[in-house]
Image (tube, rainbow, N blue to C red):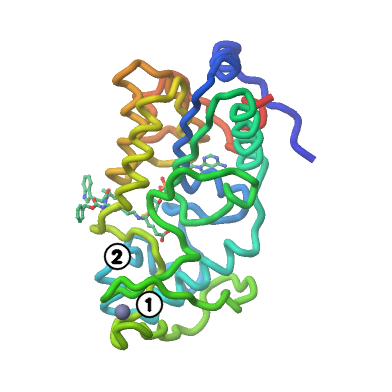
Amino acid sequence: DEPSAMPLPHEVLDLARAARHVAVFSGAGISAESGVPTFREVQRGLWEQYSAQDLATPEAFENDPALVHTWYRWRAALIQQVSPNPGHRALAQWQRRLAAGGGSLSISTQNVDDLHERAGAEVLAHLHGRITAHHCHECGAPAQITAPHDDGADEPGEPEDPPVCQVCQEGLIRPSVVWFGEPLPMADFENTAEAMRSADLILVVGTSGLVQPAASLPLLGMERGTPLIEINPEPTELSDAMHHRLRGPAGEVLPALVQ
Ligand code: BJW
Ligand code: ZN
């Protein structure tokens, strides 16, 4: 059952009811209540010495492909086992409702998980890629990797080498995610910029706003004075630019907003 609605300011509820074109920008925090650790949360156990900041780079993959491959396989297995939460479901419901009335709700996520999709939403942009897709780090050829067999271990297992590319026969297969120093997928970036520019309401959900250039996208709404609402239990890098700050978990705030 959905939790009972958390009270929100009337002004915010009025904005939500009046909106016809909503643009959502989401980050790791929207999946936190599903059990996916956020980026800047501390890792446990043996792997606590490795931070996302250290592993999510091309250099890390080139220096120690087995370590990075195994870490991503573990995260992919974890994501596969968890379920969308009421925050993901509320957005999917709102998207259907707006679309049925000739409006729209676009979702641009920095998350590599597929929890928005599994909640029934259509995602406009995966700005940092998808953990379920793979390609060759050398030639770029798309590749398939069998579903993770790792069954919910608390931490990644013994490092295993990534598969070798069947096309160029030498590159290593990597997840199709965007690492530090790599460009964002251009169509996803452009589509998000357009959605932000044409929205009449922008929601920034569960992101620290620390990682560029993605974090600047919701600010494009400021050109037209579009109301910006942040949903996050903590203040962030983007908080000062927001018109409204809803301090609570996405799984409680979003269902209340979409009522
Ligand atoms: C909740 C909650 C609940 C918790 N409900 N909320 C200096 C200045 C500016 C830029 C740079 C700079 N130095 C370097 C750069 C560039 C760099 C960058 O931004 N670095 C910063 C760290 C400083 N950016 C890049 O390198 C990007 N590429 C680039 O710039 O390319 C240039 C180029 C151009 C042309 C050719 C070549 C190159 C790429 C960035 C890629 C980011 N990738 C990652 C990893 C993806 C793969 C993977 O998943 O492993 O993306 S990093 C990681 O951070 C991941 C996330 O998508 C991203 C954003 O994190 P997010 O989602 O905000 O999560 P957290 O953990 O930070 O925050 C969680 C939030 O949730 C918190 O606020 C909580 O309070 C909240 N929360 N519970 C609601 N229940
Ligand atoms: Zn290749």
What residue is shown at x 40% (from left), y 23% (from top)?
Answer: 242
Mark 1 is surrounded, within 10 Å at the Cα level, by few (under 14), some (14 to 19) or many (20 or more) other residues, namely many
Of residue 194 and residue 111, the one placed in the foreground of this image is 194
Q: Where's residue 258, x and y in %?
A: 64, 27
Which numbered disc, 1 or 2, marks the residue that appears first in the sequence?
2
Left/right of residue 17 with respect to residue 109 in the rendered view: right
Q: Which mark is residue 194?
A: none
Above or below, 127 relative to 146: above
What residue is shown at x 59% (from left), y 43% (from top)?
Answer: 121
Above or below, 259 relative to 164: above
Above or below, 8 relative to 248: above
Dot 1: element? strand
According to the image, label 1 marks what residue? 173
According to the image, label 2 marks what residue? 57
Q: Quadrant of the N terminus?
A: top right
- Residue 253 appears in the picture as rendered: no
